[in-house]
Image (spheres, rainbow, N blue to C red):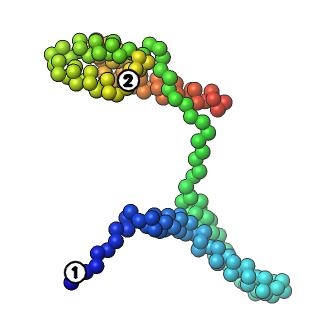
């Protein structure tokens, strides 16, 4: 008799909720630990009354070393707690890069450039033609300035200037939208 097969829990909906619960427990461990301790302390203080609390405070010996150690411990625990919390990030606005008109390349122009650049390999041109026809690129498709030249000049400087153009233009547009300097 074969042993019973274990169910596949990786796709189970219950597994998803267990994982979310575990993640919540780990992310809020310190809070979940301190709430019962603080609740118990508050209940004890309410049970004792003001005179008994004052008697306990007067009977304590305030040693400077104990005060410093407990203060350091409180500061350390609170620092660890606040540093471990994930920071909230809000999406205020977004901006898309709109390339200049000089970067636009009509489909026919791009194919002509491909034929001129790949004159030795007509199979590559045919393959590229099929891919471009199926990709849905239109007459408004934009390419980086380095690709416009015959032969293309894909250098590191051209790539850097293209990245700067895209990033800084989009960021400037975003700063204008959000009125952020």
Left or right: 180, with 111 as reference point: right
Question: Residue 31, image x and y in percent?
Answer: 60, 69
- Among the 4 quarters of the image, the one containing residue 2: bottom left
- Among the 4 quarters of the image, the one containing residue 120: top left
Q: Is residue 23 visible?
A: no
The residue carrying pointer 1 sits among few (fewer than 14), some (14 to 19) or many (20 or more) residues within 10 Å by Cα, namely few
Q: CA distance from mark 1 to mark 2?
A: 58 Å
Q: Which residue is mark 2?
A: 137
Question: Residue 134, image x and y in percent?
Answer: 32, 27
Question: Residue 39, image x and y in percent?
Answer: 69, 78
Question: Residue 160, image x and y in percent?
Answer: 39, 25
Q: Is residue 89 above or below residue 168?
A: below
Q: At 57% across and 69% down in the image, what residue appears?
A: 30
Q: Which of the labelled discs sits on residue 162, or is there none?
A: none
Q: At 54% across and 60% down in the image, what residue appears?
A: 84
Left or right: 114, with 40 as reference point: left
Q: Which residue is mark 1?
A: 2
Q: Is residue 163 above or below residue 31?
A: above
Q: Secondary structure beneath disc 1?
A: loop
Q: Please tell me which of labels 1 and 2 falls first in the chain.
A: 1
């Amino acid at each position: 008799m074969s042993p019973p097969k274990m169910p596949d829990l990786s796709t189970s909906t219950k597994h998803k909720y267990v994982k979310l619960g575990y993640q919540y427990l780990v992310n809020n461990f310190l809070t979940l630990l301190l709430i019962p301790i603080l609740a118990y302390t508050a209940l004890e203080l309410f049970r004792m009354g003001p005179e008994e609390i004052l008697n306990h405070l007067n009977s304590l010996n305030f040693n400077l070393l104990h005060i410093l150690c407990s203060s350091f411990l409180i500061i350390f625990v609170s620092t660890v707690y606040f540093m471990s919390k994930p920071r909230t990030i809000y999406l205020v606005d977004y901006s898309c890069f709109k390339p200049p008109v000089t970067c636009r390349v009509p489909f026919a122009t791009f194919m002509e450039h491909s034929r001129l650049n790949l004159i030795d390999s007509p199979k590559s041109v045919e393959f590229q033609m099929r891919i471009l026809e199926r990709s849905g690129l239109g007459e408004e498709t934009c390419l980086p300035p380095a690709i416009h030249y015959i032969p293309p000049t894909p250098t590191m400087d051209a790539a850097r200037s293209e990245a700067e153009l895209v990033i800084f233009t989009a960021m400037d547009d975003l700063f204008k939208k959000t009125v952020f300097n």
